[in-house]
Each structure stands twice: as C-alpha cells, then as structure tokens.
Amino acid sequence: MSTTKIDTATLGSTGPRIGIQGLGCMGMSFAYGPTDADEARATLERALELGVTFYDTADMYGSGENETFLSPFVRAHRDEITIATKFGIVLDPDDPAARGVRNDRPYIRESVEGSLRRLGVDVIDLYYMHRRDPQVPIEDTVGAMAELVAEGKVRQLGLSEVTGAELRAAHAVHPIAAVQSEWSLFSRDVERTAVPAAGELGVAFVPYSPLGRGFLTGSFANAATDLTADDFRRGQPRFTGENAAANAALLEPIRRIAAAHDATPGQIALAWVHAQASARGLTVIPIPGTRRRTRVEENTAATRVALTAAELAELDTIAGRVTGDRYADMSFTSAGRE
Ligand SMILES: NC(=O)c1ccc[n+]([C@@H]2O[C@H](COP(=O)([O-])OP(=O)(O)OC[C@H]3O[C@@H](n4cnc5c(N)ncnc54)[C@H](OP(=O)(O)O)[C@@H]3O)[C@@H](O)[C@H]2O)c1
C-alpha cells in the first residue's frame, strides 16, 4: 500500500505549510446521503498518512454535527493538522432547504464559541466567512474576525464565495490567508475576478467541489434518479433533466485523457485544478470531499498526474458548454454579485 506523501504549499503569506490537497469533510455528516461513520473516520486517518494535513468543515454541516464528528480526530492530531471551519450560513430547522446569511459581529462572536466548543480546541487554524451578506460592510465583518485573531481564538482568516473587489476590501482590513470558492473543470466563474485578486494579494485559493460534487468522476449521471431523496445535489440545476444528460456527454474528453494516463476521470479533474497554480501564478489547494479510504488514495495520487499543454487546452473548452447553473439560487454565490 502506497504511503507516498503529497507535496506541501504555504497557506497565505505567513503559513503554515500544509499538504497541497486538503480533505473536504462535509459529506461525512451532511448533504450527500447516508454515511458509514467508521469508514469516514478511517478515511481521515488514511488521508493524514498520505500527507493530507488540511481538513475542511463548517458550523452548518449537519448543524454542528460535522465539527463534533471531527473533534476526536482533530484533538488526536492537533499539532499535525490545520483545521478550517466557517460561519455565516443560517439553517432553518423548519425548512431544510432554506438558507439565511449573517455576517454581523454579534453573530460571528457567538458562532466562533460554538465551533471551538464542538471541535474541542482552543484555537481554530483558519476561520472563514462562509457566505457574504451584502447588507453588512465587509470591512465590519473582517474587523470582527480580526478581533478573534487578536484574542487568540483564530489563527488565520478566510472568505468563501467572494468577488475580487470584496477580497481586496477585506484584505486591506486584515490579511486574508485563503479564499474558498467552487472551482473545477465545470465551474470557472471565479477566474473573472476572485482568482486574479488572490494571485495579486498572495492569498491561497482553496477550490471546493473540485470534482464537480462527484459528477466529474462519473459516479452519478442524473441526481434525480441516481441519488437518495435527501441528497442536496438533486436541487442543483446542472445535475438533473436535460442538463444532466447534456453535461454527462461532456465527460468524454476527460475519460479519453484519463485512459491515456492510466488514470481515472476524477484524477484528471483534480490534476486540472492543481495545474491552475502554475498556469495562473497562485497557490491552489483543492479540498476534494470523500468518506472512503480508496478514494482519498485515488485523489491524492492525482497530485502526481501531469497534464500536457494540449490536454489542458482541450479540458479548458469544457466549462463554456456546461448547461445549468451551479446553484439553484446564484445570488448565493460570488458570481451573483459581479
Ligand atoms: N465553501 C462552500 O460553500 C462549500 C460548498 C461545498 C463544499 N465545500 C467544501 O468542499 C469540500 C469538497 O466539495 P464537495 O464534497 O462538494 O465536492 P467534490 O469534492 O467535488 O465531490 C465530492 C463527491 O465526489 C465523490 N468522490 C470523491 N472522490 C471520488 C472518487 N475518487 N471517485 C468517485 N467519486 C468520488 C464523493 O463521494 P464519497 O464521499 O462517497 O466518496 C462525493 O459525493 C466539501 O467536503 C466541503 O468541505 C464548501
């Protein structure tokens, strides 16, 4: 069994050094159907053996359940790993589909205490604003987050789904270590403003859903028929109906390139994301999500797949042909404010 560790990169301008690929832990408690908790725990340990030291959660994943689930692992490996969590999305207990957003100081101060308690740690390594509430000036939000750094509750700050202008305004108040937004072969709107701003400011980019929520691996072709009733992806326009069929056909070049590398389509999707670092001059640390050891082995091995310029050019043409938005409500994304 391979124990080759992945390479490392610096998170923001001041560190720490972390594995060049992180692990998205959301699916272990939330959004993607039933979970085998023992296998998920084993996946966390296997990832660490392979050099994955950056673990991603949020307070809203299972209304705190995901942070609680991660706590024993985080505490057992406190000095070896970087734990990232987020505040800002408010769930409605009476309506599982409803999403509110809060960015105000009292909410942030209350949220950080909840995350510290559930994770069972004294300090959060990277604390993200999960979604932007345009009613609250970003300077106020980042000012409140900076207080948490001064108080020793948080080490570094991050922002999710922000535009380039929002990132610049935030970074002027306090250094931002990372932007986390959706970025994959299928979802490239962040390249308009957020990616260039991150590159200029020395902010690391953390692509979420780099496997297109699993669609790019071919593990499902139509969310309505292939996934369980409670799966979040059934509500995403690009994964159902005519869109899903049209988008599944776009996987053909990915499969062909995968065969040429003796790799899987998912590895090609991840290799494309990793290749954006040198292509665009910024640090890129994707966080593919999985609950299975075999898949974390496959995904970390993708860091060693080198695509040719011709292959990258061919893969670059796919996103423009994707049909259907990445969220049912695009006002929930940075693209919705550009
Ligand atoms: N900031 C935000 O707003 C935001 C939004 C979404 C996600 N995130 C974060 O980003 C992380 C990753 O995103 P994501 O989980 O949405 O999408 P993703 O990483 O693109 O895909 C995850 C899906 O792909 C499957 N998968 C993973 N590796 C695979 C492989 N090698 N072969 C076949 N299938 C594979 C997983 O299933 P199994 O688990 O069964 O392997 C899961 O269903 C999340 O865990 C979360 O931490 C953040």
Image (cartoon, helix red, strand yellow):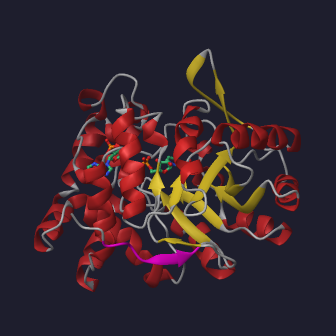
Residue at the spot x=72%, y=43% of the render? 116
Quadrant of the drawing holding the C terminus: bottom right
The image quadrant that residue 274 belongs to is bottom left
Is 107 colored magenta in this rendering?
no
Residue drawn where x is 34% and y is 71% of the image: 272
Determine whether, in the image, residue 130 is placed left or right of residue 254.
right
Q: Position of residue 169 (x, y in %)?
A: 80, 66
Chain part drawn in magenta: 4-10
Instruction: Give the x, y percent position of residue 336.
Output: 61, 50
Q: Is residue 290 visible?
A: no
User: Is residue 290 toward the left or the right of residue 53 in the image?
Assistant: left
Q: Position of residue 115 (x, y in %)?
A: 69, 41
Residue positioned 26% across, 38% down in the render:
242
Residue 20: x percent and y percent? 46, 71
Whether residue 217 is visible here, answered yes or no, is yes
Relative to 229, is 311 above or below?
A: below
In the displayed orientation, state which residue is furthest to the top: 94
Up-down relation of residue 126 to residue 69 (above or below) = below
> Quick one: quadrant of the N terminus?
bottom left
Q: Is residue 6 magenta?
A: yes
Q: Residue at x 43, y 60 (%)?
A: 48
Front-most of 63 and 231? Answer: 63
